Image: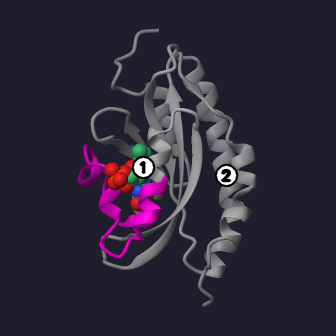
Amino acid sequence: MMQNALMPPEPLRAQIARSNVALSLAAAEADMPLIMVNRGFQRLTGFEHAAVIGRNCRFLQDDKTPVHQIAAMSVFLRDDTRDDGRFPVLNRRIDGTGFVNLVFLSKLRDHEGRIRFVIASQFDITTARQAAALAGNDEALIGALDMMRQTVGQFGLAMTDSAGLIARSITTLARFAVRDE
Ligand SMILES: Cc1cc2nc3c(=O)[nH]c(=O)nc-3n(C[C@H](O)[C@H](O)[C@H](O)COP(=O)(O)O)c2cc1C
């Protein structure tokens, strides 16, 4: 099937749009501009689709975001031996409120192993209550990723099975202090 190198397959776009978990997709070119975000992303961050397309997702960070949190994502994206990862990062919504965003990142590769897209999912773990809701979100995220992996496979794109990584996210949380309400 023909596809534009910079355009994700339409069925992938449709699955992202339909999903209840916050999802975003970037092109693996230049500064990794966002190609699309879904309603879950808009609900979480307050940023509308039109306001974020073409921008790198670091607009959610500000000067309070610890540099090591940013560096962890930067190192991961440049490391060709890792295809998926999860990163707690201090972010800011459009209304100025801060939150701890547990960012999931997964690389989509073509037949030649070149990275074409990066799919991301965001989840607020600021408070203990929100962190407790993570397990439910993760179940939905694993389901969404399973469907997307099958879809992109039909378009010659490969995506890692991240279920194990996501299941281990409790370890990520244990290392990261969440606030009591
Ligand atoms: C698809 C995608 C979604 C991302 N989502 C977030 C996010 O929600 N919050 C965040 O702080 N960084 C996010 N990032 C990471 C930043 O865009 C950027 O890669 C990170 O800040 C490290 O790169 P830099 O050092 O060039 O800023 C995302 C990256 C990609 C590719």
SS category of the residue bearing label 1 = helix
Amino acid type, residue under disc 1 in the picture: Ser
Task: Please give the name of the residue rendered at 65% of the width and 72% of the height, measured from the top-left corner.
Answer: 131
The answer to whether the residue bearing label 1 lies less than 8 angstroms from the nearest atom of ligand 1 is yes
Quadrant occupied by the C terminus: bottom right
- Which image quarter: residue 10? top left
**Extent of the magenta region:** 43-72
Indicate whether residue 84 is drawn in magenta. no
In the image, 41: left or right of 179? Answer: left
Residue 119 against residue 172 in the figure, above or below: above
Task: Please give the name of the residue rendered at 62% of the width and 42% of the height, measured from the top-left corner.
Answer: 144
Task: Judge the density around disc 1: few (<14), some (14-19), many (≥20) Cα neighbours within 10 Å.
Answer: few
In the image, 90: left or right of 159? Answer: left
Indicate whether residue 56 is drawn in magenta. yes
Q: Which residue is mark 2?
A: 140
Percent position of residue 52, x then y: 28, 52
- The answer to whether residue 38 is seen in the rendering is no
Colouring convention used in this rendered image of the protein: one colour
Q: Which mark is residue 15?
A: none
Task: Please give the name of the residue rendered at 59% of the width and 80% of the height, measured from the top-left corner.
Answer: 127
Report the front residue among 137 and 65.
65
Q: Which residue is mark 1?
A: 74
In the image, 70: left or right of 139? Answer: left
In the image, 121: left or right of 177? Answer: left
- Which image quarter: residue 106? top right
Report the front residue among 104 and 52.
104
- Which image quarter: residue 178? bottom right
Amino acid type, residue under disc 2 in the picture: Ala
Q: How many marks?
A: 2
